[in-house]
Amino acid sequence: MGTGGLLSVNELAKRYGATVALQSLTMDVAPHEVHAILGENGAGKSTLVKILSGVVRANGGTMRLDGIEYIPHSIVDARRAGVSTAFQELSLLPNLTVAENLLLPNVSGGPFKMSRRGETVDAARQVLSKFNVTDIDPRSRVEDLSLAEKQRVEIVRAFSHEPRLLILDEPTAALPDTTWLFDQIRRLTETGVAILYISHRLGEVRELCQRATVLRNGVSTGTVDLEGINDDEIFRMMVGRAPEARFPGRTASIAERPVALEGRNLAAGRLHDVSFTLQQGAILGVAALEGQGQVELFRALAGLDPISGGTILVDGKPTAIASPQQAMAAGISYVPEERKIEGVFSGLSTAANVSLPKIMENSKAGFLTYAQDARAITEPAKAVELAERYFGFRMNDLSGGNQQKAVLARALMSDARCLVMFDPTRGVDVGTKQAIYNMMRAFADKGGAILVYSSELAELVNLCDACLVIYGGRIAAEVPRAELSEEHLLSAAHGHVDDAPLRVAS
Amino acid sequence: MSLEQDMDTSAGVDTRAASRFGSEAITIAVIFGLTIVLILGSRFISPAFGGWGQTETILFLSSFLVFCSFGQGLVILVRGLDLSIASMITLGGVLTTTWLAGSNEGLWYVVPAILVVSAAIGSISGFGVTMLRIPPFIMTLAMGIIIYSLCLGYTQGTPRGYPAPALADLMRAHFLGVPAPVILLLVFVAIAVVLQSWTVLGRRLYAVGNNPIAAHVSGLSTNKLTIGAYAISAMCAGFTGIALAAYANGATLRMGDDYLLPSIAAVVVGGSSILGGKGNFLGTVGGAILLTTLGTILAALGIEQGWKTIIEGAVILVALIILRESVYEAIRVWMGRSSTG
Amino acid sequence: MSAADTTPMTDTAQASDKRRLLTGLASQGAVLITVVYVLLWIIYASEQPSALSAYSIESLLNNSLPLMLAAAGQTFVVLQGGFDLSVAGIISLSNVVVAVYPVEGPFGALVNLAMVVGIGLAVGATNGFLVAYMRIQSIAATLATMIICQGIALLILKAPGGYVSEFISYELTGSLFGVVPVAAVIGAAVAVIWLAFRRTNTGIALYAVGRDAAAAELSGIDVRRARFAAFCWAGVLYGCAGYMLSAQTATGNPSAGEPFLLLCFAAVALGGTSFSGGSGGVIGSLIGAATLMLMQKVLFSTGVSSFYTGVFQGVIMILAVLFAAFVQYMSRSRGNR
């Protein structure tokens, strides 16, 4: 497209410490255009949104808006330059009214002015009606609104700053009916506004957008004209072929093995009526887009959240798992989703991090020494290829990959027979990935059972004996090993199995 | 940028030596070093100062602060704060004098009973903080006021009685030329260091303070452990009260007041994070001795109480500013650069 | 909007009006504490009929005002999601300054007022800088500034003493035109200023930051400036609390502020302000403070030994926090329907 665009981004990059969130992103967006950003979870979409809207600063590459260098320092700065965003995680304040939220940060009209309820409400009502929202009372507090109403307020707020570039991050995640949104988008683009549209719903993207830029592992793999490309080709661009770790071979058959872990009609939060069986020596994968209920499933099995229905069976016996202690007693060990928040004790040594589940057993009458710690963790550390010289390091000083190895070693430490792993390779380097694959294979070969969710479909395809696909809180597909392919998993994860075609264009 | 990459990305090129917990050791060394410099330097104020005699006195005076700072440190370690320490010291003192009433009889059960009562009260605070989710400083402040008020009512405004003569004698005794309280201090520190750094309980408390969510995920009973920290803190304060009553041969209602804020100061100055999860009791001991030394020297200089208080506050403030995580990060990066470059 | 649209809307609008009213009342907590306050008055008056005399009302208000001002200040900090211990230090310091440097006459009273406001603003700004810009935990930062303030107070006045200018100690504790207690006027003025403030951008930002700082940031609010402003407001109100305390005691005491530490948190909690930030308000705290002082009178009049006042204060403090958390829980769980 070249220089005629409104926004042009060149080799944009963002690192958080050792984690590369965005490696190199190049794209351009023209006025009047609705431009889609496509990519798997963790491909760098949300990082792009944050950089464009001024929440974080890029540490490489350039952005130009109308040919002028664009480096927003804050949300307000970005708005001033003509970029506004409707965030996926909704940035509304629940304890304020709709009107106040719409007018933030300048509700009263000036630093030393008082807001008058009537004026605020009138101004907000004008904004709302300008974008054809008449059923939301501007005087309501946001916490009293339904999720769909909140989402519309978030979107209207982004509209109301009269942007030249509008960013909509998963705007339909909570909208049952998209007619209103699509009408507004068409109206805005007619006036010359460019829209960056981020959605995992390909049907919508095809209906709205002309072009799409595809992201894979933080790199933009190209901008495509949506007219001339079919879904399979898009999925292939999203998944790609990375020169990645080699996957260890699988055992011949696990069909005859006894069942280690079974869920019957499990319900928890978004999750409804999910049943599965996991055999000893098997690796069962779970594929899903963000927020389909997989978090609830894994947290329930780890004893972190209660199940609201159904039964969990361990070795064929119904087992109550109401706390992490009970999960561990049942032989289930959990590798948590958020390494930083749920996994790592950043101020403790690596040895202390790993040995925690068994310190009482490995102590001498409650007393600990460093040597005992180090001896106790040798075995699990070896299994995840965690070098011995890191044992004495404070966890904070380790790379993300080594931290993850330590978290995995801790999971092995508790003599679990069943590992429940949530995205164990997220944000780690290739070497660590290889170590994790080897460890999973070895664990299964010794008769252990693994339930693993991964945002990298290649892992599920190459590691697992079978794969569940969760969509909308239910199991959308159960894919046996013979049929495992990334394209298959991805289209099932987009709901293409049960409720395709999603909508008929009006 | 490139530095970060070198340090973080790959296991292969990382050649750092396992400098275990370097910053902690440095903090402790600096604090004790400062204390020694202060004591030696005090010779310039008065020739009577700076010798072994003064060191003994300082150790003796700081022992009370060390006792209660241990508990304060454990509570801060699990992300709390104990403002009931002053009242718990008073309670310990008041119970010592009224229950013993100046006789050695019953000494063997009164002292344990006081410790048990203290621990029970601490558990109530811990219960409020964990189960009822009351902010720690509100819970312990309220508990402190309640306990103080009960002491007031129990003594009808003026504590009477004396501690057991045996206790008072102990505070004045010497073993091998060393005052018994100094030996008591050393024994206490030894036990406390072992408890905090070398036992399963201590390790679990560190884990809870460092990351309560991860601790829960890892199967620790975070609530029980937190309650335990508050119980130990109250017990230490009660113990301080007993020791103070024995030393002063009586109790007053305000005897704990001089220890509440210094106990927090000692912990913070000693390098523990006020946010919890990080710290070492030896640092706290150093902080307590440093503060006591500072107080003694300022008193010898004839400096007003006001200046002493200001200096105390300033020391806390400076410690807070210096010990922020970002400053440690900066030092780490700087040290990394100088070693690689 | 056309007329046709409005008909179906009025129903839901009315319903949501009602809901909003209820939510507003409950989350303010001010209403409940007012009810408690009135009940306590009834008990007090029935125990001691003289309680309803103009003199005893005036003296009760004079007694309550310093705590009311301190609690009002604390509310600003609690709303943005923190705690301010420097309240004790600033009150002591203000009290001592007014008692050591008295300036006579109405103009002198203004000079003294300017002094305490200056002190409060300076300390508050220091707190705000440490918390908002240096990112030090509010309890720790304000603990340090509290100690320093107490030290300065001791430097100015070693032991209780000094005297407060006559205009302050007489006129400000009396009644306007012999009818309206000055204390009531000041209390009302604070309430009015608060009602105006909470409608300014900073006031709205205060609630936003206290509830969800990340979302506030994404909404374009300058989170650090809002926190800074909260500590400044708090400091100024503590200064005024010290000023009115001086008017009431007519003397200086370097540790005059200490009792305020617990009591002002109790008043804030009683007033329905949540310690997790973002809900509550100054009006509730004002009445909460008045309630605490009235309760002391009631306890005294019912013959409870003054030794045990602390037990009641402590227990009420804990119950108040639980109550505020409960109100918060109720108003949020309704939101998540």
Image: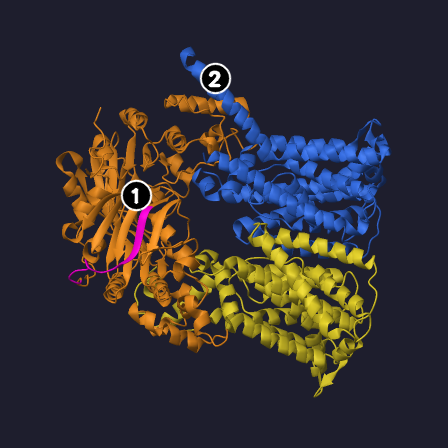
Chain colours: A orange, B yellow, C blue
Q: Check the image and report above or below for A506 versus B341.
A: above
Q: Which residue sits furthest front?
A: A317
Tags 2 and 1 both on a single chain: no
Quadrant of image for the N terminus of chain C: top left
Q: Residue at x 51, y 72 (%)?
A: B199
- Side of B128 relative to A458 (left or right): right
Q: Residue at x 68, y 73 (%)?
A: B63
Asked which quadrant contains residue A79, the reply is top left
Q: Which residue sits furthest top?
A: C3
- Side of A453 relative to C85 (left or right): left
Crowding near the residue tagged with mark 2, few <14, some 14–19, many ≥20 C-alpha atoms within 10 Å = few
Q: Which mark is residue A74?
A: none
CA gap between label 2 and label 1 equals: 48 Å
Camera-side residue of A123 and B226: B226
**Is disc 2 placed on a helix, strand or loop?**
helix
Q: Check the image and report above or below for C5 versus A273.
A: above
Q: Which residues are magenta?
A: A251-265
Q: Which mark is residue C10?
A: 2
* Rendered location of residue A38, percent (x, y): 24, 42
Camera-side residue of A67 and B128: B128
Q: Which mark is residue A63?
A: 1
Asked which quadrant contains residue B7, the reply is bottom left
Determine the chain carrying the residue at label 2.
Answer: C
Three-letter code for the amino acid on which mark 1 is drawn: Met
Count numbered badges in the picture: 2
Q: Which residue sits furthest bottom?
A: B176
Residue B170 falls within the magenta-colored stretch: no
Three-letter code for the amino acid on which mark 2 is drawn: Thr
**Is disc 1 placed on a helix, strand or loop?**
strand
Q: Check the image and report above or below for A95 versus B279.
A: above
* Rendered location of residue A314, percent (x, y): 33, 57
